[in-house]
Amino acid sequence: MEKVRSKQVIKSGYLFILTNFLLAIFNIIVGLLSNSIAIISDAIHSLIDSISGFLVIISEKLASHHKLTQHRAKIERITTIIIALIIIAAGIHIIIESVEKFTEPTSPDYTPITILVLIASLIAKYALAKYLKTTGRKIKSKVVEASGAETMNDAWISIAVLTSAIIYQIWHIDIEAYISIIIAIIIIKVGLEFIFPHLTKHHHHHLEQNPDHDHCGKK
């Protein structure tokens, strides 16, 4: 039973990686073409998620090894810290990029196609989040549920980016730098929550928790 569950975790991890990687590449291209820092920031977040997915899969494979099962908590904790540091570093980078836009402003070049791409990206993230959350509950994996929760956060960030694009299209007011800073703060907050679990009351954000613990995130 444990082997079946482990395979499901790894399968979900690969889907998580593939979807986020494709979204990241797609959004980076659109972001560069439209000169949009907000879209590029969103793409960076998706790319971070794909990298984090690799770490989660590696962690699961190591923790499932018969010689390392007793060290599962320690392996997952180390993985969590590595993921958190990557997330925080990316958030800081986005803030630096946003501040530079204040000093050297450039106008984004949104088109109806750009808006459609953003909507498509949002739908893809929402669908992935629902799948991961449903699968996580089915196989009782807090790690997979956490991936779903993080993807849902990405969907909300995409809504923020889409909102800034629509506002620019209608009123020609550029709020991208502000949106990017908000995105960066969310990213850094997520990273800090991984390192310091007491910063959040939502147990599904903690990758380091043992997914078999009944007290974690029961609804």
Image (cartoon, helix red, strand yellow):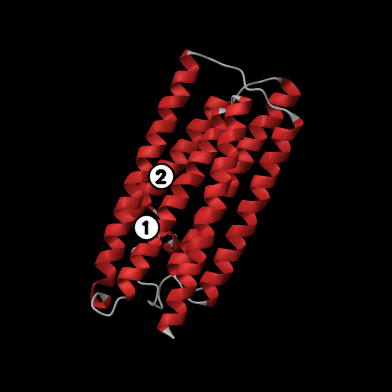
User: In the image, which disc is placed on residue 109?
Assistant: none
The answer to whether one can see residue 207 in this image is no
Q: In the image shown, does 14 or 187 lie closer to the viewer?
A: 14
Please name the residue shown 27% across and 80% down the image: 66
Q: Residue furthest top?
A: 104
**Residue 171 visible here:** yes
Give percent across and percent down for residue 69. Answer: 27, 77
Which image quadrant for residue 75?
bottom left
**Residue at which label 1 appears:** 55
Helix, strand, or loop for circle 1?
Answer: helix
Looking at the picture, how far across and down is residue 182, in whole percent?
50, 35
Q: Is residue 144 above or below residue 29?
A: below
Quarter of the picture containing the N terminus is bottom left
Tell me the residue that label 2 is attached to: 189
On screen, residue 110 versus residue 75, left or right, reads: right
Sequence-wise first label, 2 or 1? 1
